[in-house]
Amino acid sequence: MVALVLDVWLGVIDRYYFHWQLPWPETLARYLMIWAAMLAVSSGIARREHIGLTTAIDRMPPRLRRSLLVLGDLLALALFAYVLWFGLGFAGGGQNRQAMIFGVSMAPFYSAIPVSAAVCCVQLVLVILRDRGTQGESATIEVAE
């Protein structure tokens, strides 16, 4: 996000003050925004912040809620594993393409997909281990003596 903000500032300063006519800040901002948005998905997963699902799930009985949360976590894990698998091929295909404005391979830009999917998979496993479907319940931890 820092790189994105600095890049946009550079583009604004270039356009309105110095008139350097830099061709790349807008394009770089687009790719940085894609990276930021893709990586933000895992943050939402960690906090279980999905407005539509949260509203519906919070109204369900605890037993049904637990089952649906675990099922949803497993389905989401399967989805992100699928995206990761095919995203690797997508990013690899970017190796042969050139970003004309930068003169570099598109692979670093395309790799936002598999990298974010991998982070989401890790985050989902951690959420499954943390919650075990008890989101919204006041779970008490009993200490064995």
Image (cartoon, grey):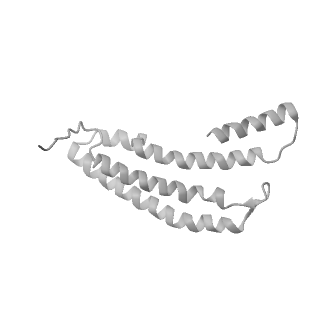
Q: Position of residue 63 (x, y in %)?
A: 21, 47
The quadrant the N terminus occupies is top right
In which quadrant of the rendered view does residue 139 lie? Answer: top left
Lateral position of residue 12 relative to residue 73, left or right: right
Lateral position of residue 98 relative to residue 80, left or right: right
Residue in the image at 42% along x and 54% along y: 122
Q: Position of residue 81 (x, y in %)?
A: 45, 62
Residue in the image at 31% along x and 47% along y: 130
Residue in the image at 71% along x and 69% along y: 96
Toward the viewer: 122 or 100? 122
Q: Position of residue 36 (x, y in %)?
A: 58, 45
Q: Position of residue 132 (x, y in %)?
A: 27, 49
Residue in the image at 38% along x and 44% along y: 53
Toward the viewer: 78 or 54? 78
**Farthest residue, direction left:** 145
The quadrant the C terminus occupies is top left
**Farthest residue, direction top:** 17
- Number of marks in picture: 0
In which quadrant of the rendered view does residue 6 lie? Answer: top right
In the rendered image, the vertical position of residue 116 relative to residue 140, given as above or below: below
Lateral position of residue 32 relative to residue 83, left or right: right
